[in-house]
Image (cartoon, grey):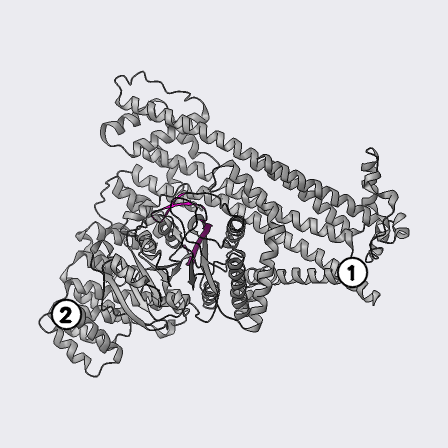
Amino acid sequence: MIEFFKVLQFIVENGIIILTIFIFGSYTALAIFSAIAMLRYMRKNSFVDYNVLLSSPLAPSISVIAPAYNEGKTIVDNIRSLLSLHYNDFEVIIINDGSTDDSLEKVVKAYDLEPVKLMFEQKLNTQPVKAIYKSRNKAFSKLVVVDKENGGKADALNAGINLAQKDFISAIDVDSILVEDALLIMAKPFLEEDGHKIIASGGVIRIANSCKIEDGRITEIKLPKRFLPRMQVLEYTRAFLMGRMAWSKLNGLLLISGAFGMFNRDVVIKCGGYNTDLVGEDMELIVRMRRYMAEHNEKYRVIYIPDPLCWTEAPSTLRVLTRQRDRWTRGTMESLFKHFKLFFNPRYKALGLLGHPYWFFLEWLAPIIEFIGIVYFIIIAILGYPNWPFFFLLLATVFLFAITLSFWAVLFEELSFHRYNKRREVVKMLITSVLEPIFYHPVILFSTIRGNFKFFIGEKTWGKMERQGFAENDDQEKDVREVEGVSPKTLES
Amino acid sequence: MTAGIKTIRVVFTILGFLLVSMLSFEASGANAPEAIVNASPSSVEISESPTPPYGSSNPSLKPTELSANGTWEWFVNRYRQASLKVKILLVIVIYLIISLTLLFLFIIINRTIKSRERRQAKEIKEIYQDELTGFLFGEDNQTFEFTGINHNVNREIFIDELISLHNNLYGEAANRLRDLYFNLELYKDSLQKVSSGKWNVKAKGFRELAQMDVKDANRHIAKFINSKNKILRMESQVALVKLNEEDPLGYLDELKYKLTEWEQINILNSLSYHQINIESFDRWMDSSNDSVVIFVTKLAGLYKQLQSWPRVLELLNHKNPEVRRAAVKTLDMFEVSENASLLKEVYFKDQPVEEKEDDVFYNLHLDRNRLAVIEAMGTIATPDDLPFFEQVLRIEKNFDILKKTTAIVHDLDPGGPELLNRVMTGSTDDLKKIIENAKQIAVQ
């Protein structure tokens, strides 16, 4: 028995070292790629005048699709915010996905809507559309409101795609706050096609908790005062600035956040639109689009834009956070297993050889190994065979590496967009970096394991996302509301 | 700030303590001490057996009892005696501690320096804004002096302000700023930028020279229209449009790369902004670069250059479907009724191709071309075109095209509504719905 444990210990400890070095190497490589890509982007972007798109007759048109479910408290303001985006030729399609509150009545009244006879092709199957509304007021001519039977976010997005008339489609969460130039910035990569078809572009999602918001716009950026949202700021910064930037450079990006993305409408339709049976429909769509292009021997790219274009509210309670993360885990697993054909398949180039395996090993498998490692250590400790020096050194290594990555992320933010102006906020971010592995990471690990468990027992619910609501002018959080069917804002890089 | 330093200090102290403790554990018999004491590196490998229970540490090796002078020696000895995996982890830990410290310092120092630089730059910028305003609108601008302009950083800020102001002014004020740019020999700075090895500095130089209309720079900039760097390529084109008054788009003859839509938008913006008129775009309509053909065809439509009509008609037979679509859209802008017969030919020519079904975009292009034809026909159609539309309604599968055709036919009087009623008999359910919808919309 003792011999067995010694052999097991030898295998596990050496395996862990190899895995640790592999993970560190991967993250370091991603950080280097990100740094190169970010530097180039910042230089390149200094020459861009997005306003040329505003008045150009050659600019493409965009359909902004925003599903809404029981958003009655804020939907009127959210729509106003969307209609005031800086872009010339665009339409805003709001999908009321069978809300049970007074969302529709409020919107009809606020925007003077009337039902219209609008014929559209059912390119993608959805729950029945009950009515389509447009405004009598010409000032709101860009607005289209669709009232349909409840079918979930993916179904609502598909209904919006069926109705979209413009060149590109942009899917957003109706309660996210977009910066005014978001469409201009997001559309640009599609205009730079040069041999490779751009099938999707996505931007950074930032956390708006504690930020000052007026008329649906962020007027002052502040670091969240509450502990959990602040942890997520760090996490988002690390994932978006250090992860996705690199994956975009490697053409291996597997995810455009559901909170804000822009897509080639034709490719989305040819791929069958969003999958309504999944909880991670945003990631799965991108994987399917990429797979479709690769299987048709088309050169393509998915572009990531590091500019902070979209601000959203992060969960501020443990209950909501863990629920959100376990859903994200299930979403990741759905995409990985549904498209397992990609795994190390050279036919799919970077997608098959890098993107899919990376997500498989580092985003899905690594937390499971970590969990098994903890269970293993507890058993060994109980049985009296722990290698304490090894354990403490490994712990210190992982802990320090996690902090180092976070410090790099803070540095990236400092050297690029520099959104947190006060020195106190930077110091807070650094302190958060130190505390995160101790207090926050275990919570995320727990949620991930729970997500795995739920996936394997076949649970496919979204759960309810409890939101505090953005407060105007201060960070007092008001209007607690229950929202079902909001976007999974998957963070994994 | 103080809290941050304190926290970091505490964390490092704890880590340091952990490290020393670990080495103590590792060396104190935890890994078969009798094998390790005289170990060579290879024997250390062998000694990598799992740790016996509880790490029975020798009290004489406790770090707390070590003298200060002996600490380093003790540390080195324990390191030599440690197993390979512990050595690896130890090296990584030390590396990470050093990295973290340096990163922390760099972030804080960088923030301090950058804040100071930004503050100073803002102050200098405000000074130059005031001085330039004084220069433009003050009484005596002949002997005007600008603060610290010989300093490199200041000079760069001054050029930026000058260019920015010039961009927003017209007429006499703009001319005076341009004179100032030459009198202060700032064009030399801009030309120097063009010679820089850094592409972003080069591109900035292009912008400055173009904004200030430095004609001599033309030849320096023209070299970059086929640069591999996309930004240089675009910036050089935009600059040449401004600088080459006689032939603003002449460089298109030499362009080897695809003219992206973003470049097209920027070039058009430059043409509009500087109010540059080009008599004819015909010369590029037979370019071997299809993107150039598409661009100039669009321009011919936007500038309503009806004299290009015959050349645009020729493009309806171009092999590239995107060129054909650009030609159809331009003809739509011309609104010439003689286009009808040729447009109809394009419609029948651009039917979906079965062999190309695996090509993701080929048939989509053809669908768009047919839709563009129907839209163009919508502006010039007469009841004489009803037979064509009837054929479309009977053979067309694309929903958007059917919907558009139905709407056009419904408004064609006389004969349009009657045609819809006739087509409805025996048509598919989808087409019936489309026609019903067109009628309902008309009633609304």
| Residue A182 left/right relative to B51 | left
Q: Is B64 located above or below residue A204 in the figure?
A: above
Disc 2/disc 1 C-alpha distance (Å): 82 Å
* Figure quadrant of the N terminus of chain A: bottom right
- Quarter occupied by residue B96: top right
Mark linked to residue A10: 1
Is residue B288 visible in the rendered image? The answer is: no
Residue drawn at x 63%, y 60% as measured from the top left: A366
Q: Are marks 2 and 1 in contact (CB under 8 Å)?
A: no
- Residue A256, position as x, y percentages in the image: 46, 58
Is A453 inside the magenta-drawn segment? no
Where are the magenta residues, as a range? Answer: A194-220
- Residue type beneath disc 1: Phe
Tell me the element at label 2: helix
Q: Which mark is residue B443?
A: 2
Q: Quadrant of residue A275?
A: bottom left
* Depth check, front residue: A462 or B432: A462
Residue reaching furthest to the left:
B414
